[in-house]
Amino acid sequence: MKFIFSWIKYGIGMLFFKMIGWKCEIIPKELGNKYVLIGFPHNTNMDAPFGIGFSFVNRIQSSPMIKKEWMFWPMSIIFKWMNVMPVDRNAASDIVDQVAEEFSKRDVFIPVIFPEGTRKEVKKIKTGFWHIADKANVPLVLLYKDDARKRLRILGHLRTSESKSEDLIRIRDIYRDAGYQIPSGDV
């Protein structure tokens, strides 16, 4: 039954991308079942369907993170079915601890984060994604929402080092080489 359900979700994801005229790359399987998937740019609240569609196409059980304000009925039923993780953005440091702790509780855990700070001419991105990956000792997988090519692209992955600023420079450079400039107020 799980196999059939996986194919149904795959079909839904492929249909979603086909309907909007996008393509979605497949994530390398060697990354395993635990990592933080980050996506840039975050230009709309509708980025969540991209994260969910990506999960369905890749047949991974991810946990897209969305504002807790979106967890209202009937959307809450759909989001719970999709394993969406609601977050209270007013408790930023607590979010890092909560999400990092989930890695020790689950065999499969892939939070999907489109970092805040890439919308509305913001000059500095929020770096909770780095703190989560560092605290949980899991890799960051870099997803690029390439609007020009209408494609979700995997740009690579990296493990956090002892220097957040060096890691952010590496991430910035990877996205820049792909054609996207991350706001560099932190770097």
Image (cartoon, helix red, strand yellow):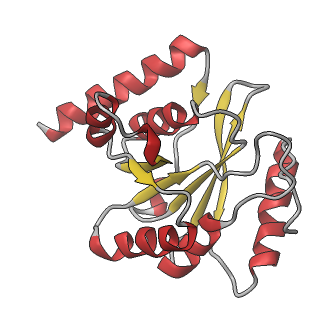
Question: Relative to residue 84, is residue 160 drawn left or right?
Answer: right
Report the residue at 69% width, 24% height from top.
Answer: 150
Residue 106 in percent (x, y) is at: 28, 68
Residue 57 in percent (x, y) is at: 43, 34
Question: Relative to residue 82, is residue 65 drawn left or right?
Answer: right
Q: Eyeballing the image, is 87 above or below 100?
A: above
Q: Eyeballing the image, is 83 above or below 157?
A: above
Where, quadrant-wise, is the N terminus in this rendering?
top left
On the image, which quarter does residue 124 sit in?
Answer: bottom right
Near-viewer residue (176 or 72)? 72
Report the residue at 84% width, 43% height from top.
Answer: 180
Report the residue at 48% width, 57% height from top.
Answer: 88
Q: Residue furthest bottom?
A: 162
Q: Eyeballing the image, is 108 above or below 176?
A: below
Residue 50 in percent (x, y) is at: 54, 33
Residue 39 in percent (x, y) is at: 64, 47
Where, quadrant-wise, is the C terminus in this rendering?
bottom right
